[in-house]
Image (spheres, grey):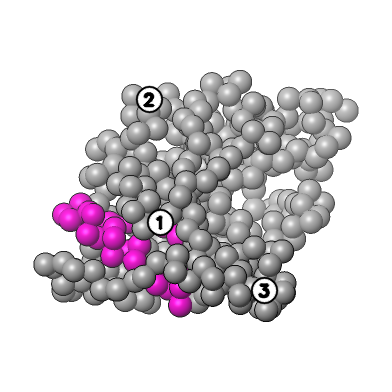
Amino acid sequence: MQNALHIKQFELSEKDALLSFLRIAYSDDPRQSDPLFWEWHYLQSPHVTLGNMPIWIAKDADEIVGQMAAIPVELKIGEVQRRAIWILDFVVRPDYRRRGLGKRLVLAAEESCPVRLGIATNEQHSPAILKSLGWAMLGKIPRYNRMLFPGNAVREISRFKTLRQFVNIVYAPLRPRLSKRSSVHSYTLQAVEKFDSSFDALWREASAQWPCAVVRDSAMLTWQFSKQPGKKFEALGLYEQERLVGYVVLFVRKQDSNGALPKAAITDLCYHPSRPVEIIDELLQGALQLAVNRRVGALVTDVTDPLVEERLQRFGFWRTKNPQQLMVKSADHQDLLYDSSNWFLTRGDSDTSIFEQSNL
């Protein structure tokens, strides 16, 4: 019955019913309904509270027929911080579509949080729904790619071992030659074992560069890059003596069936404003060196930051097509939030890295 349809915020007692719905809605992607992934995402996040979980569901009587789930974050807007949500997962059962449930789910989420963010593509239904509800579309998120071992990156080549090796040898002169960069400052790049208080200090000083950015404190970095089930991220910290001045986080995909590593991603990057060009260059060189050492086919990243983008191109990255668009809705601070030039975003800020396939 139509009057049995209702929208509500999810309660933990409904977990089993929700996971059952997700198993059907994402029958080709079991990770969406994996209890470990779900608990990491919705119970272990530093910004989730059990009484205010960032999930809204559509129910027909007692049956769940739709969901909108989000990532809660702290967002820096100018000189203040505000609670915000990234829309992560938005799905309605096919036989319940065209009944306005999608809009009702979005409106329910909007009531709970002053600032709403989303990443969407034109292939999804969500951009049209969000635009109809007054969301601002700020444009495409830049994506950059650097080919390193094309024989490993191109599937049609990688399955033939001899051809793969030949292509990689031929491409060798075009591969970046990495060496210690000359600088009057002494930097040390080392693997990060723990996101400690030095990352909080870095963020406090680095964040002054960007009018709009998701807060990257140690709790958020630990949750996303140290605790995410089924994945191993590799973080490199750049130190000037004992002081952390930047970091880069990488995600290397699993080997394919032919034993090749097709792709790695720069998932996140942060740099101190004291000597930004030097620091960014050191971080990019470290990321490229790791990828070359692993014989990764290509290194990719998504980033909105003019200086990082300029340095990426200096290191041989080229901009590629990216269907992802940033969407925002807020009643306040629109002068800052609705101007794409104010934003600092990386691949790790939304669901792009979260929904990468496991590499363990």
198 w.r.t. 294: above or below? above
The local crowd at label 1, few if under 14, some if 14 to 19, many if 20 or more residues have their Cα within 10 Å, is some
Q: Is residue 56 left or right of residue 141?
A: right
Magenta segment includes 236: no
CA separation in Å, label 3 and label 2? 54 Å
Residue 53 percent coordinates (x, y): 56, 47
Q: Amino acid at mark 1?
A: Gly
Disc 1 target residue? 316
Look at the image and say whether residue 286 sits in the magenta stretch: yes
Frontmost of labels 1 and 2 is 1
Residue at the spot x=60%, y=59% of the render?
Answer: 356
Q: Is residue 115 left or right of residue 252?
A: left
Q: Position of residue 38 (x, y in %)?
A: 63, 59
The majority secondary structure of the magenta stretch comes to helix
Give the side of residue 70 with respect to residue 172, left or right: right
| Front-most of residues 118 and 305 | 305
Give the residues in magenta.
264-293
Residue bearing the label numbered 2: 334
Q: Please determine whether, in this image, residue 321 is positioned above or below residue 268.
A: above
Q: Write the residue at 36% across / 76% down.
A: 191
Residue 173: name its quadrant: bottom left
At label 3, counting other C-alpha atoms closer than 10 Å, the crowd grade (few under 14, some 14-19, many 20 or more) is some
Which amino acid lies under the numbered mark 2 shown in the image of this protein?
Answer: Gln
Query: Element under label 2?
Result: helix
In which quadrant is the N terminus drawn? Answer: top right
The numbered disc on residue 88 is none
Q: To which residue does mark 3 refer?
A: 163
In the foreground, 301 or 222 = 301
SS at circle 1: loop
Residue 81 screen position, x and y as percent: 32, 41
